[in-house]
Amino acid sequence: MPKLVFDIETVGVDFEALDPTAQELLLASAKDDAERQVIREMLGVSPLTGRVVAVAFLNPETNKGGVYYQKQNDNEKEEEVDDYLMVPCADEKEILKRFWDLANHYDQFITFNGYGFDCPFMMIRSAIFKIKPSVNLMHNRYYDKPHLDVYDKLTNYGAVRFKRSLHLWCQAFGIESPKDKGITGHDVGQYFKDKRCREIALYCVGDIKSTALLYEYWEKYMSGR
């Protein structure tokens, strides 16, 4: 059964570009300037105020993969970096379309917290662009096919309330964390503004490497009857 581990990176829209009603709704719960600033910085976590700028993927059986990411100049070309194909795309729509085309070739999809973030984000953004996903990644979460969320498995579907931080899970299992290389999900928005999209893409690749290793631990030592 062909498997595909994947992860996304997202950025928020410019808050000032939102209409006054949207701004008011978003800031309604903020109690002070600090909270208002946090809300402005978190626009990328919602598909209503954010967009996909990278999707990394890995076949854990062949250990080969790649990443579709938004290019920021026409000089960027496809290249291979450590068995990962770096594919610059014109925009979010192309990223999503390429991913769903790729998904046609796989039967199982593996994520870390994909039910809580990656999958609904991608499916909603795809619908906005009138792109029909080639697979429903938001099916019954208690069934492993076509989507297995490693975080769900490790926490028994949230019954055990551990942190969702991939970094903490990596530390516990002795896996190299992508955060060890100096970039975290909180930095992606600024990296995008600074036109450092290739670095975002490489960070996204780090996430899928870690997720694949966590999945291997779960499959070998925690799954079964």
Image (cartoon, rainbow, N blue to C red):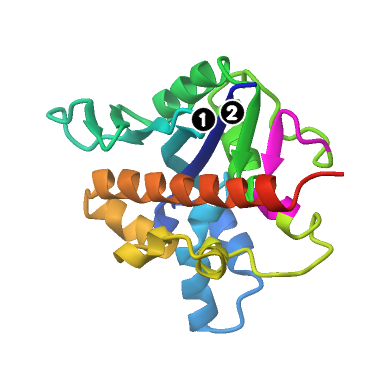
Residue under label 2: 3
Residue displayed at 37% across by 34% down: 67
Magenta span: 143-153
167 relative to 154 in the view: left or right: left
Q: Is residue 81 above or below residue 151?
A: above
Q: Earlier in the sequence, mark 1 or mark 2?
A: 2
**Which is in the foreground here, disc 1 or disc 2?**
1
Question: Residue 205: horizontal and vertical position, in percent?
Answer: 39, 44
Question: Residue 102: horizontal and vertical position, in percent?
Answer: 49, 19
224 relative to 208 in the view: left or right: right
Residue 152 is a magenta residue: yes
Quarter the C terminus occupies: top right
- Tag shown at residue 44: none
Labelled pair 1, 2 in contact (Cβ < 8 Å): yes
Residue 190 is a magenta residue: no
- Tag shown at residue 61: 1
Q: Is residue 124 above or below residue 198?
A: above
Q: Amino acid at mark 2?
A: Lys
User: Which of the pair 112/171 is nearer the observer?
Assistant: 171
User: Which of the pair 211/67 is nearer the observer?
Assistant: 211
